[in-house]
Amino acid sequence: MGVYLDHLSGSPPHPAVLEEMAPFLDVECGSPSAVHSMGVRARRAIETAKGRVAALVCARHPDEIIFTSGGTEAANLAVKGAALAGGRTGGHIVATTAEHPAVAESLRWLEGRGYRVTRVGLDALGRADPAAVGEAMREDTFLVVTHLVQHDIGTVQRVAEIGALARRAGAVFCCDAAWGAGWVPVDVGAMCCDLMSLAPARFGGPRGAGALYRRRGVALEPLLHGGVQEGGLRAGGENVAGLIGAGRAALEAERDFVERVTRARALQERFVRGMASAVPSWALNGPRPGEERAPNSLSLSIACVEAEALALACDLKGVIFGASTSCVSRSMRLSAVLRAIGQPDALAAGHLLVGLGRDSTEADVDSALSVLPRVVGRLREMSPSWGELLAGGGDPVVVDWLMEHGA
């Protein structure tokens, strides 16, 4: 397959996940709602899976896990479900300017129905100031929403501090951890989380299975109706094999967490060093590798190239990168997150994502670094703006950003 560095948008399931799912894709075909022996085995397997997901996020009870079809549904259920609970028809919500589309679009949907949302800005590294979140809260604030890891640039937010502020204010705190759980330590109790959306496909699980942590006592209005599954909060026949796979992925992610994260951070540093020595005029978006950055994600903005052309040209050379997050890449829009941190559009057009996976190696990074600089150079030869930049001209806004934030 060559070198695959787009694990943020799609990654192969852990081998143990596939093995545990296999019987439930074949002979174990019973519905968890059935009273016969096959149904009982399916139901018990799902309960085991919930316990494993609960352990990954340090939840106290397996029944605090609600299974969904993916991280997007989990985020929608958390945000909309919390807002609509108890017949609420309005109120105030605090979020950031750069939430994942699953959260951002849910908030816009609520605004169209009379809810008010205050969005707190980010600094140039993609960090939300907890103090600013606290200042944005009002007497009628009932919900505070933020993300664990910024989906486009990999910044780890100060979730525990934000959660503590929400708890003191009596607001429900919802954390979108779809881009961080399994790669960043999660403790829903220490983070004061009431709700947390998860995407097991990003830590070795199958696609089509998601999870929502809901602290006991937190009210939610279901979005799907027609059945009593998931305690009446998510109607519909369960994706039994997928949910079992999600649980096994959580178990494996917990088991190899330290080794996997340590290896991924070393690969990040290797990639950044290689880029710094081989490619001029680019910026690392978000913090440098370390505690403030998710270990599986690098976000680069490369001057005077277009990300789509760059990703396609590298693909032809056997190296696969991401040109944007998977939810918006086909729309060909510039990253809203890069705009939120103040990056000029001309530089954001060269946004490339490096997504590391469980099996990524030094050889993968070195192969990518043997291809990427040559492709960048070839594309720049055809770019008038590159000639202007070399001659000391070019877009002054881009030049200023590179001077301040460039690698």
Image: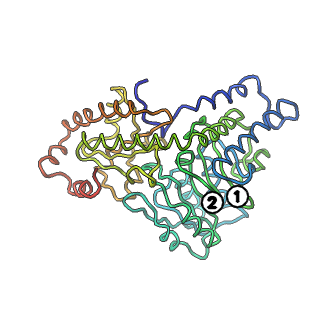
Quadrant for the N terminus in the image = top left
Identify residue type, mark 1.
Arg
Q: Nearer the viewer, residue 270 or 225?
A: 270
User: Whole-percent x and y of residue 231?
Assistant: 78, 49
SS at circle 2? loop
Q: Is residue 56 above or below residue 321?
A: below
Q: Quarter-wise, where is residue 19 in the image? A: top right
Vertical placement of residue 88 versus 205, above or below: below
Q: How is the image coloured?
A: rainbow
Identity of the residue furthest to the bottom in this view: 139
Residue 349 in the image, given as x and y percentages of width and height: 32, 46
Return the x and y of residue 263 as percentages of the image width and height. Answer: 46, 40
Front-lying residue, 325 or 331: 325
Q: Is residue 42 left or right of residue 284?
A: right
* Residue 151 horizontal/vertical position (percent): 47, 49
Q: Give the spatial CA distance, label 1 vs label 2.
A: 8 Å
Give SS at disc 1: loop
Question: Residue at left 50%, top 55%?
Answer: 99
Find out whether the residues at labels 1 and 2 contact each other: C-beta distance under 8 Å. yes
Q: Tell me which label, 1 or 2, sits earlier in the chain.
A: 2
Q: Which residue is mark 1?
A: 215
Which is more toward the observer, 48 or 217? Answer: 48
Above/below status of 331 relative to 115: above
Amino acid type at mark 2: Cys
205 and 36: which one is in front? 205
Q: Which residue is mark 2?
A: 193
Q: Residues within 10 Å of mark 1 (few under 14, many from 20)?
A: many
